[in-house]
Image: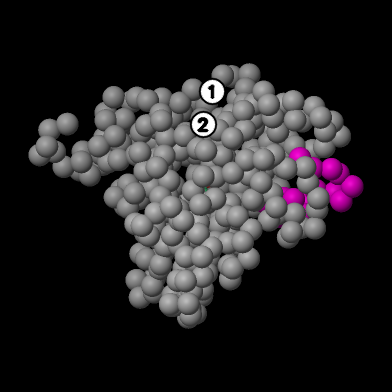
Amino acid sequence: IPTDIDLVNEINKLKKEKNALLMAHYYQQNDIQDIADFVGDSLALAWEASKTDASIILLAGVYFMGETAKILSPEKKVLVPDLNAGCSLADSCPADAFEAFIAEHPDHIVVTYVNTTAEVKALSDIVVTSTNAVKIINSIPEEQKIIFGPDRNLGNYLQSISGREMVLWDGACHVHEKFSVEKIVELKKENPDALILAHPECKKPVLTLADFIGSTASLLKFTQNSDSGKFIVATESGILHQMQNSSPNKTFIPAPPSDSTCGCNDCEFMKLNTLQKIYLTLKYEYPEVFVKEDIRQKAIKPIQKMFELSG
Ligand code: 13P
């Protein structure tokens, strides 16, 4: 790429020329969020992808998000800025092992978090995101046994909220697992007026400290509606951009991981995406996301079930 190129200008031109929709997850770098046509959580990205009339969807997030968009909009060209932007949670649940796990619990309904491969979605009865998981679990009849995967932390949280016992797959998000309880307690001591916010992918000791637990979209909304002026935020630090944008007079402190001195907790996969890559992806319409049609037809059903149940 020539060094004098104005990337924002060029990306905007290409978007128009090609009728492309640029969607970004809240964990993307600030400059990507700023140029995106739509910024949202996993549920909102899936929903937008299902109803857009754009010819191209460029999904700046991690691979399963692009795959979900392709499952929902197979006639669209779905592009991602970097094929290496994977997800540790999706990787923690290989389809063949999950299929064997389901076979060990034959009379269970299979509920999976959206952070999975298309193959795992194809094995599922209902997909959930952190925005609608509580509502969907509560809607399942009491006597129905449930398998939940792949996130054991979200699974444990759902069990504690709903009172339902579920068979849990033993997976986790490497970013949310590494928040330091000690450092959060220290931050709270230094900022006694701050509320602690946490994503349900965090481990139980962190969730125990939290004043509010929710998906990225719910945490953002909470900061907008709260009377408090200060928050310690235990999720990937990309979300702070929209929090700060919509509440410029409030203070947002990223909760730190135990293994870092930088103070914030970034997902290295989310952060693989850059404006340069977005420009090249739009220009050359590569890399493209493909999902095998037989898998897609199975994988779309639990996602549609999720839309139906989440209202
Ligand atoms: P939400 O944005 O749906 O809360 O999910 C966060 C996440 O795990 C993204 O990978």
On the question of residue 233 being in view, the answer is no
Find residue 67 and name its label. Answer: 2
- Mark 2 within 8 Å of ligand 1, using the beta carbon: no
Vertical position of residue 83 compared to residue 152: above or below: above
Q: Residue at x 54, y 23 (%)?
A: 291
Above or below — where is 170 with respect to 29? above
Is residue 16 or residue 235 the one in the foreground? 235
Q: Nearer the viewer, residue 259 or 170?
A: 259
Do residues under tags 2 and 1 come within 8 Å of each other at their CB atoms? Answer: yes
- Residue at image point 40% right, 50% down: 266
* Percent of width and height locating residue 177: 54, 50
| Precedes in sequence: disc 2 or disc 1 | 2
Instruction: Give the residue type at disc 1.
Output: Val
Residue 292 relative to residue 62: left or right: right
**Coordinates of residue 96 in the picture (x, y in percent):** 67, 23
Q: Horizontal and vertical percent for residue 100?
A: 74, 25
Q: Is residue 225 left or right of residue 250?
A: right
- Residue segment shown in magenta: 133-147
Residue 291: mark in rendering: 1
Look at 55% across and 33% down and name the residue there.
Answer: 91
* Quadrant occupied by the N terminus: top left
Any magenta on residue 89? Answer: no
Q: What is the secondary structure assignment of the residue under circle 2?
A: helix
